[in-house]
Amino acid sequence: MDLQAYVRRIGYEGGMAPTLETLRGMHRAHFFHVPFENLDIGRGVRIEVDEAVIFDKVVRAGRGGFCLELTALFASALRALGFRVDVIGARVMSEGRLGAPMSHMMLIVHLDEPWIADVGFGGRVAEPLRLADRGEQRAGPRGYIVTNDGDHWFVTCTEPGSPPMMYLFTMQPREFGEFRPVCDWLQTSAESRFTQGDIVSLATPSGRATLANKRLIVFEDGNREERVVESEDEEHRILRDRFGITLS
């Protein structure tokens, strides 16, 4: 892990001690600078849950990734700074159904108390969440509630129109290698949402931009604009200018 290269990639300029202030600052920097995207899948490029491969892609090539890539990279950076981090496998709730086991990766960061860190949930959770807090927690423009029932923990978004539950998890720590089977499934199965077409999304302090299915959707200050992307050249310009991605 080349920490200096990583912090330059995410635009982070704060302290580097393993504190809550550093965790929050790095989480927000990663959230606003690294897009959520699955562009490799449609182009036949294999996605790996491997620290070196992810670092080359996201940091050196200026790309984004999906949750297994983005969260694994963030975990590696936090550990290099001296944070104690558990990698956790979660199941996402989508359209009333739970996703495959361990098809989402999030982190528990142990400070004076445990914190949930999740930079890979489609650009939704802007800041860490307290695991033990049962009230609404604000993370950027959205509110979240963390609850548990025995060994099962739940993260819910309180934003109107959001699903009743975002995802569930247990506290069992995992190794990166344990995610390789589900990573293969996510990029090959017809049942995976990531094989249904390209998606690129990046949050901004006042909204979000998403490029999906040849449409650019921009939310800014509560306003929504959507337009069709007419050509491949235009798509590449949007990827470069709005998301910082240049495809080889």
Image (cartoon, rainbow, N blue to C red):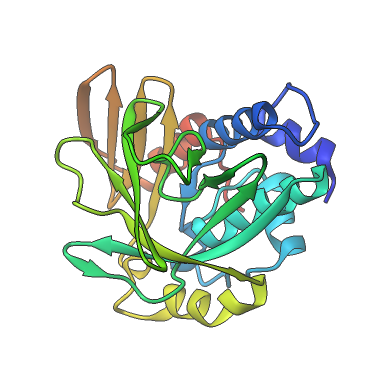
Spot the residue most to the front. Answer: 150
Spot the residue most to the top. Answer: 221
Residue at 41% of width from left, 26% of height from top? 140
Residue 150 lies, in percent from the top left, at: 37, 67
Q: Is residue 145 left or right of residue 49?
A: left
The quadrant holding residue 81 is top right
Whether residue 223 is situated above or below residue 37 in the rendered picture? above
Residue 187 lies, in percent from the top left, at: 45, 73
Whether residue 6 is situated above or below residue 24 in the rendered picture? below
Q: Which of 241 and 222 is in front in this view?
A: 222
How many numbered discs, if any? Answer: 0
The quadrant holding residue 158 is top left
Q: Which of 4 and 201 is in front in this view?
A: 4
Residue 57, can we see it?
A: no
Residue at 57% of width from left, 69% of height from top? 45
Residue at 46% of width from left, 58% of height from top? 38
